[in-house]
């Protein structure tokens, strides 16, 4: 069964992010009331139909472990944002950045947004079944 992001009443805060995470968001995911700028492209909130979070793949063994913990510092995620025929993917973001992006979409989006991914990024509700 698919799920949809629940509309949030409070805008997500940048307070829980590191300076590097906030800097990343400023350059790759900058939010405004009527639109969001994702990787330099201005997108209206009503364009966003779905969000998908996936854990970034890493090679198994010592090489994957070194990349995960010494290059990136921890687990990373990919955030896919979809609407119509378009897609935008923010790659190798931290847990906090992925959570902020998901919650910002849940806060600003005027329409229901389908969600696929791990639990805990933002509150979700099951899709309404149509008979």
Image (cartoon, helix red, strand yellow):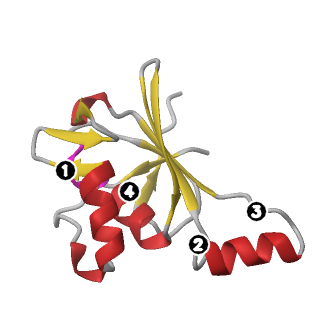
Position of residue 16 relative to residue 61, above or below, is below
In-image side of 24 versus 115 (left or right): left
Q: Earlier in the sequence, mark 2 or mark 1?
A: 1
Q: Closer to us: mark 2 or mark 3?
A: 2
Coordinates of residue 109 in the picture (x, y in percent): 24, 43
Q: Earlier in the sequence, mark 4 or mark 1?
A: 1
In magenta, the rendered stretch is 105-109
Q: Which residue is mark 2?
A: 72
Point 58% across, 72% down: residue = 72
Q: Which residue is mark 4?
A: 102
Q: Does 95 lie within the magenta span?
A: no
Q: Earlier in the sequence, mark 2 or mark 3?
A: 3
Considering the numbered disc 4 on the image, is that residue within a helix, a strand or a loop? helix
Q: Earlier in the sequence, mark 3 or mark 4?
A: 3
Q: Main secondary structure of the magenta part?
A: helix
Q: CA distance from mark 2 to mark 4?
A: 21 Å
Point 47% across, 30% down: residue = 87
Q: Which residue is mark 1?
A: 31
Q: Quadrant of residue 38 in the image?
A: top left
Q: Are marks 2 and 1 in contact (CB under 8 Å)?
A: no
> Would residue 127 be seen by someone viewing this image from the given angle?
no
- Estimate how packed mark 3 is, as few (under 14), some (14 to 19) or many (20 or more) residues with alpha carbons within 10 Å: some
Q: CA distance from mark 4 to mark 1?
A: 12 Å
Point 41% across, 72% down: residue = 96
In-image side of 55 versus 44 (left or right): right
- Estimate how packed mark 4 is, as few (under 14), some (14 to 19) or many (20 or more) residues with alpha carbons within 10 Å: many
- Estimate how packed mark 1 is, as few (under 14), some (14 to 19) or many (20 or more) residues with alpha carbons within 10 Å: some
Q: Which residue is mark 3?
A: 58
Q: Are marks 2 and 3 in contact (CB under 8 Å)?
A: no
Q: Closer to us: mark 3 or mark 4?
A: 3
Camera-side residue: 21 or 63? 63
> Would residue 91 be seen by someone viewing this image from the given angle?
yes
């Amino acid at each position: 069964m698919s799920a949809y992001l629940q509309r949030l009443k409070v805008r997500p805060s940048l307070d829980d992010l590191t300076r590097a995470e906030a800097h990343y968001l400023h350059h790759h995911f900058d939010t405004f009331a009527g639109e969001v700028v994702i990787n330099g492209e201005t997108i209206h909130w009503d364009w966003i139909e779905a969000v998908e979070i996936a854990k970034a793949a890493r090679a198994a063994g010592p090489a994957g472990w070194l990349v995960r913990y010494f290059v990136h510092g921890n687990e990373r995620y990919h955030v896919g944002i979809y609407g119509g025929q378009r897609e935008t993917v923010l790659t190798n973001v931290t847990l906090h950045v992925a959570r902020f992006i998901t919650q910002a979409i849940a806060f600003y989006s005027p329409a229901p947004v389908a969600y696929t991914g791990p639990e805990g990024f933002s509150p979700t509700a099951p899709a309404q079944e149509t008979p």
